Image (cartoon, grey):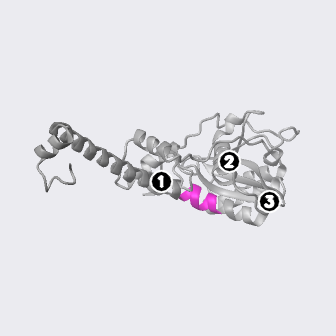
Amino acid sequence: MREYSGIYSMRIMARVLNVSRSGFYLWCNSSGRSNFRDERKQVIDERVKSVFEDSKCRDGADRIFVELTEKGTPHNIKTIRKSLKRQDLVPKAARLFKVTTDSNHTLPIAPNLLERNFSASKPNEKWVTDITYIQTTEGWLYLAMFIDLFSRKVVGWSMSEHIDSILVCDALRMALWRREFPKNIIIHSDRGSQYASCAFRELLTKNELIQSMSRKGNCWDNACAESFFHSLKVELLIGEPLQNREKTREAIFEYIEVDYNRQRRHSAIGYQNPEQFEAMFVS
């Protein structure tokens, strides 16, 4: 009837086809609304998928919500969740990882000055540090890093085939150099022998830094450092084919310096990336 509406009258077509004109008009109206809904869903799905893929399949509904809002195309968080489900877009899933440091030693232990207070009022007030391992085709690769709790920015890091005091000292030297050697920072770690070593403690003393350590066997005392390694392994490594050490180093470098510090939105700082957050503080 709609196709021939310009040729025959509705009254005649309705009589010939034995249907009511009111029913036909109702169908036309509902069909139009259905087409509009379908078109809107398609637009939303395209926007959500674009942000999801730009994040390398890492962002969930909360981060996509913020990203779309900043782009001037806001959508309700429930709408975004429905779109992700409709398109079967699932952010990379969480997995557990093992503790790498050895706290069974007789070296000096520092008090827990942080006491799970992971907030900071300014840069270079509190740094947390930890070590993890990454499997490669050539064996283990160890990563040590330092995070500024003010912005959640990774300010220093180091990678090595060996897990020793040199690894953590190199990461601290990078952080100090990049931050122009600030003083009186609380440096919090677990009780691993690398952090209790003479070389690390001497480096702290030389640069007028304050050492703090978690309670024995309590990962929650250093939760922010654990969270970083969780994100790195989930978003970068799990589910991907193993690479040699050189390729793995390159991938971790890009993740820290580009993805994590300059692009990844952190809930702890209002879903901004660390570079943005620190730039706002300076300005």
Percent coordinates x, y for residue 95 in the rendering:
69, 42
- Do callouts 3 and 2 mark residues in contact (Cβ within 8 Å)? no
- Do callouts 1 and 3 mark residues in contact (Cβ within 8 Å)? no
Of 268 and 216, the residue lying toward us: 268
Percent coordinates x, y for residue 124 in the rendering:
58, 51
Tell me which amino acid carries mark 1: Lys
Q: Quadrant of the C terminus?
A: bottom left
Left or right, 99 with respect to 50, comes to right
Left or right, 269 with respect to 129, comes to left
Percent coordinates x, y for residue 1 in the rendering:
20, 48
Tell me which amino acid carries mark 3: Ser
Q: CA distance from mark 1 to mark 3?
A: 37 Å
Residue 69 against residue 21 in the figure, above or below: below
Q: Nearer the viewer, mark 2 or mark 1?
A: 1
Label 2 sits on residue:
229
Of 10 and 239, the residue lying toward us: 10
Label 3 sits on residue:
160
Q: Is residue 180 visible in the rendered structure shown here?
A: no
What's drawn in magenta, residue-wise?
254-263
For marks 2 and 1, the one nearer the N-term is 1
Left or right, 267 with respect to 24, comes to right
Considering the whole magenta stretch, tell me its main secondary structure: helix
- Element under disc 3: strand
